[in-house]
């Protein structure tokens, strides 16, 4: 059996894991969008999505 404090700590950790998973998923989507833009030689869109992917990786 866990104490209220232990439960709160585990709940907070689970929340952090969910947020990290969200950021990793978003980073992957932006990396794919950057790759697609790069295939079409769209330098601006490639840079934009690469920048957003990097930001999500930092947040994770």
Image (cartoon, grey):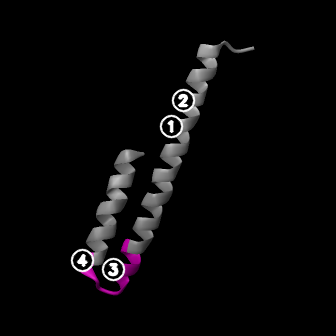
Q: Which comes sooner in the sequence, label 4 or label 3? A: 3
Q: CA distance from mark 4 to mark 3?
A: 9 Å
Residue highlighted by disc 3:
38
Query: What label does residue 44 carry, if any?
Result: 4
Along the viewing direction, whichever of 8 and 56 lies nearer the viewer: 8
Q: Give the magenta-colored segment's residue range.
A: 34-44
Q: Are marks 4 and 3 in contact (CB under 8 Å)?
A: no
- Relative vertical location of residue 15 with respect to residue 59 in this rendering, above or below: above
- Relative vertical location of residue 15 with respect to residue 48 in this rendering, above or below: above
Tag 4: Cα neighbours inside 10 Å, few (<14), some, or many (≥20)?
few
Residue highlighted by disc 2:
12
Q: Which comes sooner in the sequence, label 2 or label 3? A: 2
Residue 3 locus on image (x, y percent): 66, 12
SS assignment at label 4? helix
Q: Is residue 10 magenta?
A: no
Residue highlighted by disc 1:
16
Label 4 vs label 2, nearer the camera? 2
Q: CA distance from mark 1 to mark 4?
A: 32 Å
Q: Are marks 3 and 1 in contact (CB under 8 Å)?
A: no
Q: Are marks 2 and 1 in contact (CB under 8 Å)?
A: yes
Tag 2: Cα neighbours inside 10 Å, few (<14), some, or many (≥20)?
few
Residue 49 locus on image (x, y percent): 34, 68
Tag 3: Cα neighbours inside 10 Å, few (<14), some, or many (≥20)?
some
Quarter occupied by residue 1:
top right
Label 2 vs label 3, nearer the camera? 2
């Amino acid at each position: 059996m866990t104490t209220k404090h232990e439960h709160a700590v585990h709940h907070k950790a689970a929340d952090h894991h969910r947020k990290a998973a969200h950021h990793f998923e978003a980073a992957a989507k932006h990396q794919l969008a950057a790759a697609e833009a790069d295939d079409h030689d769209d330098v601006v869109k490639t840079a934009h999505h690469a920048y957003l992917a990097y930001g999500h990786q930092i947040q994770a």
